[in-house]
Image: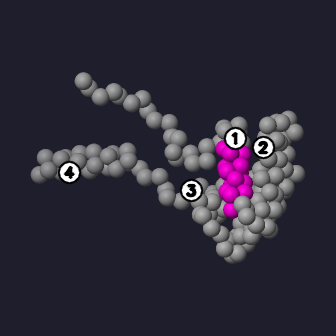
């Protein structure tokens, strides 16, 4: 009787240890706390909208309106970030934030005149300019947009020959 009790206790301890070793990360990301992070999230939402549309070959009036609204929101939020969270000691940051605002303003101009020939390509170009500016700024500040993709791995053991 005692043998079975000991075996059951031992197996429960081992089984419990295996489960604890493979804890699953919660599916909901931790909520951002800083105001700057919230403002950047607003820009990210608008950027993802226009980026999703940037591969299309034709826009209708409602699509131009979406691009216009997204561009105006990005301009507004970028101006707020540049005034409230300026880093006067970091010239590269200041320059990249200015480029982001300029690209968003150009996107607004393009969307207002969306019926002209070449407007589609100009809108796609501005999306690429935003993408490039965001990537450069994140690299400059050493911010990983998707940190779960860049987790440091333990030393990997090479396969046996």
Q: Nearer the viewer, mark 2 or mark 3?
A: 2
Residue at figure coordinates x 83%, y 42% from the top left: 94
Along the horizontal axis of the image, is 31 left or right of 91?
left
Residue at figure coordinates x 33%, y 45% from the top left: 17
Mark before the other along the chain sequence, 1 or 4? 4
Residue farthest to the front, as pictured? 117
Q: What is the spatial separation of the Cα atoms under label 1 and label 2, in whole angstroms?
A: 8 Å
Residue 25: give x, y in percent of width and height.
Answer: 47, 52
Instruction: Name which quarter of the figure residue 106 lies in.
Output: bottom right
Secondary structure category for the residue under label 2: helix
Q: Report which residue position mark 1 lands on.
A: 136
Mark before the other along the chain sequence, 4 or 2? 4
The residue nearer to you, when weighing 137 against 56, is 56
Q: What is the spatial separation of the Cα atoms under label 1 and label 4, in whole angstroms?
A: 57 Å
Q: Report which residue position mark 3 lands on.
A: 29
Q: What is the spatial separation of the Cα atoms under label 3 and label 1, in whole angstroms?
A: 24 Å
Secondary structure category for the residue under label 1: helix
Residue farthest to the left, as pictured? 1
Dot 1: few (<14), some (14–19), or many (≥20) neighbours within 10 Å? some
The residue nearer to you, when weighing 127 against 149, is 127
Residue at figure coordinates x 60%, y 64% from the top left: 57
Q: What is the spatial separation of the Cα atoms under label 4 and label 3, in whole angstroms?
A: 38 Å
Q: Are marks 4 and 3 in contact (CB under 8 Å)?
A: no
The residue nearer to you, when weighing 101 against 15, is 101
Q: What is the spatial separation of the Cα atoms under label 2 and label 3, in whole angstroms?
A: 27 Å
Q: What is the spatial separation of the Cα atoms under label 4 and label 2, in whole angstroms?
A: 62 Å
Instruction: Name which quarter of the figure residue 158 lies in.
Output: top left
Mark before the other along the chain sequence, 4 or 3? 4
Residue 15: give x, y in percent of width and height.
Answer: 28, 49
The span picked out in magenta is 120-136
Q: Which mark is residue 8?
A: 4
């Amino acid at each position: 009787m005692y043998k079975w009790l000991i075996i059951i206790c031992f197996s429960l301890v081992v089984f419990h240890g295996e489960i604890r070793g493979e804890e699953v990360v919660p599916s909901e990301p931790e909520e951002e706390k800083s105001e700057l992070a919230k403002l950047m999230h607003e820009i990210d939402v608008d950027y993802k909208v226009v980026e999703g549309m940037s591969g299309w070959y034709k826009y209708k009036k409602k699509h131009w309106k979406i691009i216009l609204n997204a561009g105006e929101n990005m301009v507004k939020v970028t101006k707020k970030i540049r005034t409230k969270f300026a880093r006067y000691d970091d010239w590269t940051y200041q320059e990249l934030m200015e480029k982001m605002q300029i690209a968003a303003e150009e996107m607004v101009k393009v969307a207002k005149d969306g019926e002209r020939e070449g407007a589609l390509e100009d809108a796609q170009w501005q999306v690429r300019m935003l993408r490039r500016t965001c990537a450069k700024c994140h690299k400059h500040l050493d911010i990983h947009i998707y940190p779960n993709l860049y987790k440091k791995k333990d030393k990997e053991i090479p396969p046996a020959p």
